[in-house]
Image (cartoon, rainbow, N blue to C red):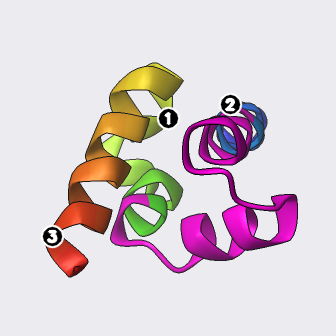
Amino acid sequence: MEFLKLNLTEELVAILVEEKGLTIEDAFSVLYRSQTYARLSDPHTQLYIQSAGYIYSMLEEELLNKK
């Protein structure tokens, strides 16, 4: 599970950098402070078996709702 989470974290950060124009540091900060990442880190949700695109859509929705 940890390996999958780390790979997804890398992919999500890369997407945030590309899509939102964030620095790598800011992208990590946004991701680590999100509810989406909290769900990804919870083994009971099994979110780590989903694609980065699917998880990013959840993160994007969360970020839109925070504004």
Q: Quadrant of residue 30?
A: bottom right
| Span of residues in magenta | 11-36
| Residue matched to label 2 | 4
Relative to 67, is 20 on the left or the right?
Answer: right
- Indicate whether residue 34 is drawn in magenta: yes
Q: Residue at x 31, y 65 (%)?
A: 63
Residue 65 position by quadrant: bottom left
- Disc 2 and disc 3: Cα gap in Å? 27 Å
What mark, if any, has residue 5 been given in the picture? none
- For label 3, the SS is helix
Residue marked by disc 3: 65
59 to 2, vertically: above or below: below
Helix, strand or loop at label 2? It is: helix
Q: Quadrant of the N terminus?
A: top right
Q: Nearer the viewer, mark 3 or mark 1?
A: 3
Disc nearer the start of the sequence (2/3): 2
Q: Amino acid at mark 1?
A: Tyr
Chain-order first, disc 1 or disc 2: 2
Asked whether, in this view, residue 64 is left or right of residue 49, the answer is: left
